[in-house]
Amino acid sequence: MERAIELARDPQQIASYKRRLSSHRSTCLLFNMPMLVDRLEQLFASMCRDYQEGRLSEPDSTNLGAYLEVGIDHDHDEQEMLSIVGYHDIYKAKLALLHRVRPLCADHRLWTTNDIAQFKGKQAMHTGDSSDARDDNGEVLTRQFDAAVR
């Protein structure tokens, strides 16, 4: 609510957001109407099939809390996530950090069984007294994440 009030009092910031949206319109998935229509049609067809077969569709909410935590951690005012090349890798690096603290189940979005297996391999590469998870090159994932969002 506070952010909405701040924006209401700052027309220049609103104009800045509009310019940024306009400049990214051709590359941003948010504005890819054919893809959106196709995915919505697929979802409706799936729901219809489920209903006809007597199944009640349930959304998959696996790891949504973790995705929310990762998304909130990013400073969206400073940098638009979709403008970052390889932003999925940033999410995966942060999910790996969360997985180290409390293991996450595989899901059908970004955190897959392959990612969990890679993370376990990276954990095995862990060296020294630091509790940081490391990637295939031995680079600390927290540093990789911090550098990627700058």
Image: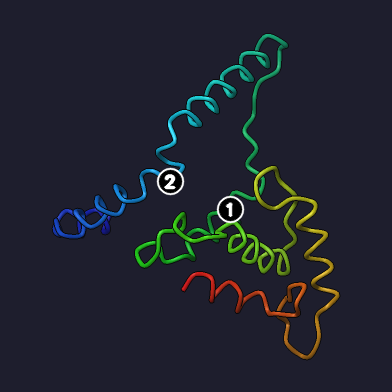
In the image as oriented, which residue stretches furthest toward the top? 52
Earlier sequence position, callout 2 versus callout 1:
2
Question: 13 and 85: which one is in front?
Answer: 85
Residue 15: x and y in percent read 19, 54
The answer to whether the residues at label 2 and label 1 have Cβ atoms under 8 Å apart is no
Relative to 26, residue 140 above or below = below
Residue that carries the numbered disc 1 in the rendered image: 65
Q: Which secondary structure lies at badge 1?
A: helix
Compared across the picture, whether 88 is left or right of 17 comes to right
Relative to 4, residue 31 above or below = above
In the image as oriented, which residue stretches furthest toward the front? 26
Residue that carries the numbered disc 2 in the rendered image: 28
Disc 1 crowd, CA 10 A, few/some/many (<14, 14-19, 20+): few
Relative to 92, residue 146 above or below = below
Residue 80: x and y in percent read 41, 59
Relative to 44, residue 64 above or below = below
Disc 2 crowd, CA 10 A, few/some/many (<14, 14-19, 20+): few
Compared across the picture, whether 18 is left or right of 41 comes to left
Residue under the image location 68 percent in, 17 percent down: 50
